[in-house]
Image: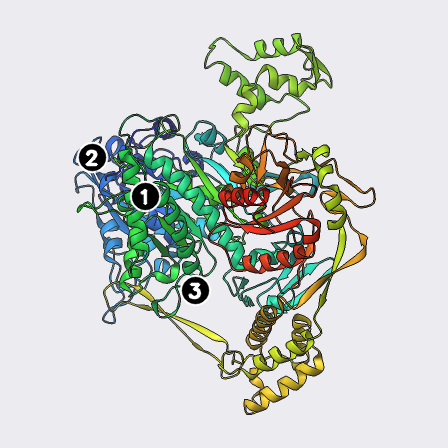
Amino acid sequence: MKIKLEILQHQTDALTAIGKAFPGMDTMSHDPDANYIYANPLINYRYNDKANIDIKMETGTGKTYVYTRMMYEMYQKYGLFKFVIAVPSPSIKEGTRSFISSDYAKQHFSEFYENTRIQLNVINAGDFSARSGRRNFPAQLSEFVEATRQNANQIEVLLVNQGMLHSKSMHRDDYDQTLLGGETSPIKAIAATRPVVIIDEPQRFPRGKKYYEDIEEMNPQLIVRFGATFPETTTGRGKNKVTKVDYYRGEPQFNLDAVDSFNQGLVKGIDIDYPDMPEEQANNWYKVKQVKAKELVLTKGGKDYPLNVGENLADVDAGFEGNITYAGGTDRELSNGLALSKDMKLIPGTFAENYQDEIISQALDCHFKAEEENFLRLNSGENAPKIKTLSLFFIDSISSFRGENSGKGWLAQHFEDILTKKLKKLIDRFELAIDDREKEYRSFLQATLKSLQSEHQDVYAGYFSEDRGNSDDDIQAEVDDILKNKEKLLSFKDHKGKWITRRFLFSKWTLREGWDNPNVFVIAKLRTSGSEISKIQEVGRGLRLPVDETGHRLSQDEWPSRLSFLIGYDEQNFAEKLVGEINTDSPIKLNQDELTEDMIKLIVKVKQQTNPQFNENQLLDDLDDHNVITRSNKFKDEVKLDGQTMSGYDALCQLYPELEQQTRVAQGKVRDKNSKDNTVVKLRKQNWQQLKNLWLQLAKRQMIRFDPSVNKDAETVAWNVFNDSDNKIFVLQRPQMVHQEVDTTSGNAIVKETQADYSTEYLTMKYGKFLKILAKQTDLSVNLLNNLMIKAIKRLRNNTNYINEKTLGNLIRTFNNQFNERIKTSYSYEPLKFSASTSIYNAEKHEFVDSIPASVLGVYQSNSTSDEKYLYDRPPLRYDSADPELKILQRSYGPKLSVFGKLPKKAIKIPRFDNGTTTPDFIFKIEHGSKPIYLVIETKAENMRLGDEEIRIIQQKYFDHLKESGVYYQMATSEQEVHDLINKLENGELN
């Protein structure tokens, strides 16, 4: 497969705007160096900011293409042949290099600029390394500087990132060779060539700051900036403070903003998803009050929780799983790599492995939904070319992906397990496929599963900054595929006809900028990125419109495409922030109090596209006729329009909808499927009344009474844990130092990294604090724990260095796991004398509620036919999982079933022995002689997760004491299983 670059109208418009804004060439100059063969010819108004050009283009719309073609245009028209491209980071530099040097780009531009080529010179870290005791210039720098106009049909381009541009190597002047016969400083040598400088991502090069000063030192004749965001300047203070975007000429010479990009279909639409979380967990959050290199302060409910470097977040809240400590340093990071910032919100529940599994599972569901559509291409004509579907996962820790000794980290293993189960289900679904394309898709899925289960799987890959220069062949192959082999990632088969199954990519934010692939349809953030970067930038890796297997780019009209963006609950307002960013990007600020000059100009401009005679006077006359504005263009408070009363601003928008269409992202372009709303579901009271007798019993509170043997069991488990027979619980903890060095022995500069203990001292904890946390997290007495610790330390030759946070975490985790396993059946439920309200029942009034929030019944909805036996008004149906929940709800049942329905969250509140409550999913009332049967169902997917069996045991124990009332409990994994149970109960086959 070969990517085909195509001429797009908005890119052509950008090039036209550059051509109009270009100041022209100075052909009348008397400068004696005007014809200096090593330098660009002279430009009018050179070295003047007012001659510089700003091109605003949203992420994903092809600004790299535009500035690459601009260089060809300027060479062909004006003879300008030396350009410097300045980018913010090495990753963006790599992306730019990859595009300009790609075969498909060279092929495309050769069609317009015959026999003209770009000589791309890239300066990287390590290129200035001294060799043989001499300090020489890198060859690529020398080639750029000393190339002359006599090199026919060759454009010289120097590509450099801001860190390299600002480095000492670029500014020093003590090299052992010269350029241009006398220059000993790289930056001055570049300046002598009178370059045209292209700045990519201008907000990272603000005027007056150090990186822009480096740009100025190159003494460019002309600067052309390309970006979605530009730097801002602030003047005045207090009420007189004014902040505005810093454009060279006061405004960009071409403006393709975010609103236009989405509304014109130049990028994908976006769907935001996040797994919901129990209210109790969601409300348990901490704010970062202060974050310093050596100390972190969290706050909750007015109480501060200070943590020094090395201290465990579980000391603050046991919900922070994974033995996470504060690492501090200049990056202010946690030990899992999460960068912290002031006022950031941390929800302990999002740190749990099972929560990340939920995001992975939802991401894979989104992936396969998109993949099936893109592969089969239904309704696109016969044999429409397939579209490869890619998914990108951002994770917080390389160790969770790559384990020790070339093994797999826990995250990679979990991903494989979840992916394997979903692949098997899909393969089974297409087992009876008749259509050739469906058979082909099944073959693709089978090849994926086979590769995933092989020793060297080729289905998913990772790229991390630590991978640069990695000697592991498999890892290096993954990195090359991700960074350099874009066309391979977009292809379905290799030259031998073998399926290319790699389509799941993992990165630790390294791919957040610079890298892009048009066929990313899913991005999943398994943890918040921490820093408050632009939301548009975060989704930017997946905004580009896709290409099919022939390399053809698919417009939204041709094939509507959307990006699924999955996040954690701690970023649930992401969609709102993203829409806000998009709308704020509009150059026109809407004023709901008065009709501004900018609003008038915008309406006139848009109307003139269809009615060239339309002007400002016509607009104002029309608004006057409708009594919308006053003489001073203020909006009137009340306006009557088409029989309705509204504000003057609303009337304007109704008369001229173009105003908001041009300044607001269209509805549906960014969707939040899990967004909280005020939707309620009404109960069918007559049906719920049939459950009243049962509910009077369910409403009675229950107390857990543990067996008398539990205390003895706790001591027994504690003795076993502290004995540490495997020598895995009591461990030593020592700080690590990471050492990096640049190695050039292979001819390429690579960074080698090693880790070693940097201190002979061990990290320890104060014994009092150690005991206090241990007692709190295990519910064991301090006296017992103290005795156990004395014995353990004595066994360890009185080495108190074992009293540290790692040992503490091991003790708490191991004890709780073993104790819970031991006592999970060693208790009973004892009814209390009072009832309590739940989400479905008001205990004070002894009646069911009228309605419930839709979200407690299910986060998704589906249209359905009405069913008089259902417990709520329908349609729509609310559910949490398509299989089996939705299938159970959509199934029809026999005449003996009088009522049925889904139970809302916290409808019963069964106490759990390990804290918290649980509620099953469904209830069915079956008529059976004089005594009805109540079937209570807990649903789980066939691939049950750890803890599902525990829930079954808890619920089974609870409902066993209601058997006399006709309650039958069962856990089910399919709608057929439920249907069969109902039939058996109706026929009296089960007791």
Foreground of the two, 52 or 273: 273
User: Going 25% across and 49% down the picture, which residue do you hit?
Assistant: 144
Q: Earlier in the sequence, mark 1 or mark 2?
A: 2
Q: Is residue 158 visible?
A: no
Counting from the top left corner in percent of width and height, residue 907 is at 69, 47
Query: Of circles 3 and 1, which is in front?
Result: 3
Q: Is residue 918 above or below residue 133?
A: above
Q: How far apart in space, not on screen, are marks 1 and 2 (Cα)?
A: 23 Å
Position of residue 389 in the picture relative to residue 945 (left or right): left
Q: Which residue is mark 1?
A: 195
Q: Secondary structure at mark 2?
A: helix
Q: Earlier in the sequence, mark 3 or mark 1?
A: 1
Residue 399 image label: 3
Position of residue 315 in the picture relative to residue 178 (left or right): right
Q: Is residue 599 visible?
A: yes
Q: Are marks 1 and 2 in contact (CB under 8 Å)?
A: no
The amino acid on which the numbered mark 3 sits, given as a three-letter code, is Ser
Counting from the top left corner in percent of width and height, residue 933 is at 65, 45
Counting from the top left corner in percent of width and height, residue 667 is at 54, 28
